[in-house]
């Protein structure tokens, strides 16, 4: 936390310098931003570097299955009203990437840090955050990450006794279970579209009752807490009952939920809701997500969806039929190599759209669409898909590495 902080030790300074040099070499070799390799080199030289770099900052950590990169960006914009911010804005969210980001923030007042779900407890121990935002938990990369109930338990154990203010989604039972061990929680009614990972009680395993927007366990009494911030349509209600308009350039209900949570976080740092929400309007795209690009004389909107909950939210914001849709799925290391999650996605929501399928695992996706009774065309490249698509703006939905492939090809 901010306050009187000791200057960096000679070892820490050497680690930062070496990390920046490694990152520069990686960039020069065309291997990306270099933030991960730079962070790894720096942490090898000084394993305590992450904590040292954060000691002068008021830090907020953001973690979730979906929406953490966007929410991190919205919080960063809001907090800039109160001082300089350092953030891992491009989503390098494991300790090495976080270390690289903080190494460039010696003059910052705030650190706004996205954290991979598996690393949240460890990073929280290292950087002593002032606030932690918990948005949602759902199935994702089941070959790499723990089952959601196990992950929630790890968060619950890791956050027990934390002095941080935890800003948590009251509508997700797994998030409520995770946050309930913390002594200081601000509950936000941000909604939960995807419920398939939250039908059993995380406390006792009983069946969850879900009347309307409420939820509770009929067996042990675990239930939805009363929220102090509420997303209601295009407004967020603050703890005093005042309604503040949410005006975003980012599409969809999920981003309004992200903005509501971000406003609650900003308030913990003394930034009023009106100021925070006005600043969020400047965000047009996040690491290429939601960008509209021109490729082969066609407009493409680039949308990222990495897991069943994310695909469900994305389907809700695309233009209606007969808008053409390109779907791209890979299963590389960063995606998770298990594509069984495709069977959890309700692709029948795309009925009426001309559908084109690309990506490394296009045949896996083709089988899924065939079973769903949808008409589609398998293509080898994004160029082929765009060439064959009927007129109109194209919605392109891809998972993580497929999204990066498309961005490189279309020059975004």
Image (cartoon, rainbow, N blue to C red):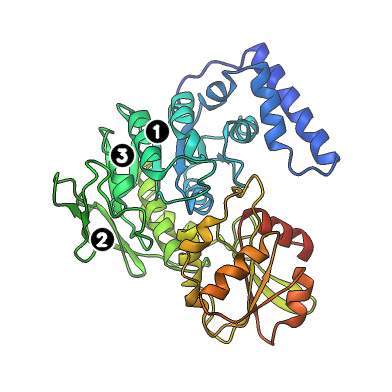
Q: State how far apart marks 3 and 2 are (Cα).
A: 25 Å
Frontmost of labels 2 and 1 is 1
Residue 212: which quarter of the image? bottom left
Left or right placement of residue 239 versus residue 63 in this view = left
Split into 4 quadrants, where in the image is the N terminus? top left
Q: State how far apart marks 3 and 1 are (Cα).
A: 15 Å
Q: State how far apart marks 2 and 1 are (Cα).
A: 25 Å
**Whether residue 114 can be seen here:** no
Q: Are marks 3 and 2 in contact (CB under 8 Å)?
A: no
Please tell me which residue is depicted at 62% across the width and 83% down the height of the picture.
354
Q: Secondary structure at mark 2?
A: loop
Split into 4 quadrants, where in the image is the C terminus? bottom right
Closest to the observer, 380 or 216:
380
Please tell me which residue is depicted at 61% across the width and 48% down the height of the picture.
337
- Indicate the position of residue 134 as horizontal and vertical percent values: 39, 45
Please tell me which residue is depicted at 48% across the width and 60% down the height of the picture.
308
Left or right placement of residue 182 versus residue 42 in this view = left
User: Mark 2 packing: few (<14 Cα in 10 Å), some, or many (20+)?
Assistant: few
- Indicate the position of residue 140 as horizontal and vertical percent values: 49, 50
Of labels 3 and 1, earlier in sequence is: 1
Frontmost of labels 3 and 2 is 3
Vertical arrangement, residue 33 with respect to residue 20, above or below = below
Frontmost of labels 3 and 1 is 3
Please give the label number shown on residue 130.
1
* Residue designated by label 3: 179
Please give the label number shown on residue 242.
2
């Amino acid at each position: 936390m901010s306050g009187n902080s000791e200057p960096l030790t000679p070892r820490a300074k050497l680690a930062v310098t070496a990390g920046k040099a490694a990152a520069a070499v990686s960039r020069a070799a065309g291997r990306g931003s270099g933030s991960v390799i730079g962070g790894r080199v720096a942490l090898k030289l000084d394993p305590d570097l992450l904590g040292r770099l954060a000691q002068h900052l008021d830090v907020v950590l953001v973690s979730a299955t979906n929406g953490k990169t966007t929410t991190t960006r919205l919080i960063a914009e809001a907090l800039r009203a109160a001082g300089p911010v350092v953030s891992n804005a491009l989503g390098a969210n494991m300790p090495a990437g976080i270390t690289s980001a903080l190494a460039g923030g010696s003059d910052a007042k705030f650190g706004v840090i996205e954290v991979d779900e598996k690393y949240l407890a460890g990073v929280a121990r290292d950087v002593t955050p002032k606030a932690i935002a918990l948005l949602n938990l759902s199935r994702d990369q089941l070959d790499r990450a723990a089952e959601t109930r196990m992950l929630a338990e790890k968060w619950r154990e890791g956050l027990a006794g934390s002095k941080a203010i935890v800003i948590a989604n009251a509508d997700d039972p797994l998030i409520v279970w995770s946050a309930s061990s913390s002594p200081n929680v601000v509950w936000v009614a941000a909604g939960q579209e995807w419920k398939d990972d939250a039908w059993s009680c995380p406390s006792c395993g009983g069946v969850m009752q879900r009347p309307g927007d409420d939820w509770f366990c009929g067996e042990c009494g675990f239930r939805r807490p009363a929220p102090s911030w509420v997303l209601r349509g295009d407004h967020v209600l603050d703890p005093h009952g005042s309604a503040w308009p949410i005006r975003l350039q980012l599409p969809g209900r999920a981003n309004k939920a992200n903005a509501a949570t971000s406003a609650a976080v900003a308030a913990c740092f003394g930034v009023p809701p009106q100021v925070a929400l006005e600043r969020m309007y400047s965000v047009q795209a996040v690491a290429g997500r939601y960008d509209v690009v021109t490729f082969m004389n066609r407009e493409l909107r680039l949308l990222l969806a990495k897991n069943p909950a994310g695909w469900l939210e994305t389907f809700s914001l695309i233009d209606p039929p007969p808008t053409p849709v390109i779907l791209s799925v890979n299963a590389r290391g960063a995606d998770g190599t298990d594509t069984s999650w495709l069977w959890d996605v309700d692709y029948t929501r795309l009925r009426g759209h001309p559908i084109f399928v690309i990506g490394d695992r296009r045949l896996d996706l083709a089988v899924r669409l065939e079973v769903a009774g949808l008409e589609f065309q398998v293509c080898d490249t994004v160029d082929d898909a765009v060439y064959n698509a009927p007129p109109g703006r194209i919605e392109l939905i891809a998972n993580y590495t497929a999204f990066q492939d498309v961005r490189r090809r279309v020059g975004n």
